[in-house]
Image: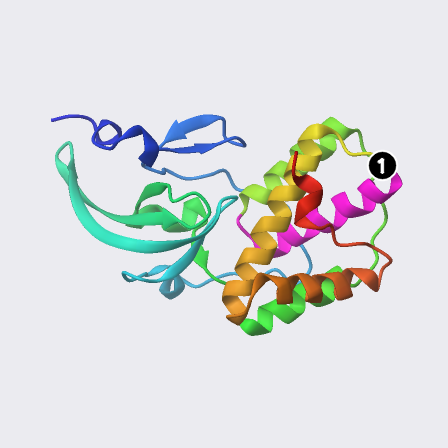
């Protein structure tokens, strides 16, 4: 029998630039110490998903549980969730027992959306760390899967961008944070992404930050 990762076509494999590897069976991610104010945690009950549930895969965004299956791995039989990532239509298989360590979670609730908007409206000090240290810290924050962390990265990079040009890698990270935030908030509120962009623009304007247009990231 072929190894599990060879049972699927290449287009089903998921590449994560922040983990620098190619995989389909997700085993977990390192613990990250960064936590934005108001960050929330889920109980074990929140990690039990059903077919059709909308979930968030860290650093890749919203996906849908398409299938729940059991597969033999050696002498053991393990259950897997099959996720379809919305942005790229990539397929990801995650062992049900590893959902917590991987960081898969449900889409934020409406009350949490307001906490994120409040967080974005409060001014922070501009980071003065070296760009390499800053990039590593922000990469770790993005990997947590927390939308509060994504919002924190977005706000810090926007503030930095208004002070001086971003490096190419930080500009790509800002683009990714923007997409993750807008797409999930739109799904949470069941509204168009343009409406979410208006809310984010208003929140950031309270601390004199300008929410970037999507067109600014196009080549």
Please tell me whether residue 37 belongs to the stretch shown in magenta: no
Is 19 placed above or below 83 here?
Answer: above
- Residue 181 image position (x, y, % from top left): 60, 55
Q: Please report the residue visible at 33 percent of the width from the left and 33 percent of the height from the top.
A: 11
Quarter in which the C terminus is drawn: top right
Is residue 35 among the parts visible in the rendering? no
Q: Secondary structure at mark 1?
A: loop
Q: Is residue 103 visible?
A: yes
1 lies above or below 67: above
Q: Position of residue 163 (x, y in %)?
A: 88, 41
- The one nearer the camera, 62 or 103, is 62
Give how far across and how far down residue 136 sits, in percent. 66, 32
Taking the image as shown, residue 100 lies to the left or right of residue 139, namely left
Left or right relative to 113: residue 201: right
User: Which quarter of the rendering shows the N terminus?
Assistant: top left
Pointer 1 residue: 128
146 inside magenta stretch:
yes
Residues drawn in magenta: 145-164
Q: Residue at x 67, y 61 (%)?
A: 197
What secondary structure is the magenta-colored segment mainly?
Answer: helix
Q: Residue 212 vs residue 71: left or right?
A: right
Q: How is the image coloured?
A: rainbow
Count of marks, rendered view? 1
Q: Report the residue that reaches farthest toward the bottom.
A: 111
Badge 1: residue crowd in 10 Å (few <14, some 14–19, many ≥20): few
Q: Is residue 68 left or right of residue 38?
A: left
Residue 207 in the image: above or below residue 219: below
Name the residue: 59% across, 43% down. Answer: 142
Identify which residue, 38 or 194, lies in the foreground.
194
């Amino acid at each position: 029998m072929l190894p599990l990762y060879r049972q699927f076509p290449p287009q089903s494999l998921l590449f994560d630039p922040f983990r620098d590897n190619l995989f389909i069976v997700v085993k977990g991610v390192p613990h990250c110490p960064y936590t934005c104010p108001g960050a929330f945690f889920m109980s074990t009950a929140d990690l039990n998903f059903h077919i059709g549930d909308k979930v968030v895969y860290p650093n890749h965004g919203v996906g849908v549980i398409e299938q729940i299956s059991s597969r033999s791995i050696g002498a053991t039989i393990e259950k897997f969730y099959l996720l379809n990532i919305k942005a790229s239509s990539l397929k990801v298989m995650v062992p049900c027992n590893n959902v917590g360590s991987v960081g898969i979670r449900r889409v934020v609730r409406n009350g949490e959306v307001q906490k994120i908007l409040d967080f974005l409206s409060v001014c922070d000090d501009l980071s003065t760390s070296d760009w390499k240290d800053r990039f590593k810290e922000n990469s770790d924050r993005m990997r947590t899967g927390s939308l509060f962390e994504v919002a924190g990265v977005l706000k810090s990079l926007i503030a930095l961008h208004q002070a001086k040009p971003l490096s190419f890698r930080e500009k790509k990270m800002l683009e990714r944070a923007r997409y993750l935030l807008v797409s999930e908030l739109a799904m949470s509120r069941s509204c168009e992404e343009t409406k979410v962009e208006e809310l984010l623009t208003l929140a950031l304007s309270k601390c004199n930050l300008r929410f970037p247009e999507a067109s600014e990231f196009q080549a």
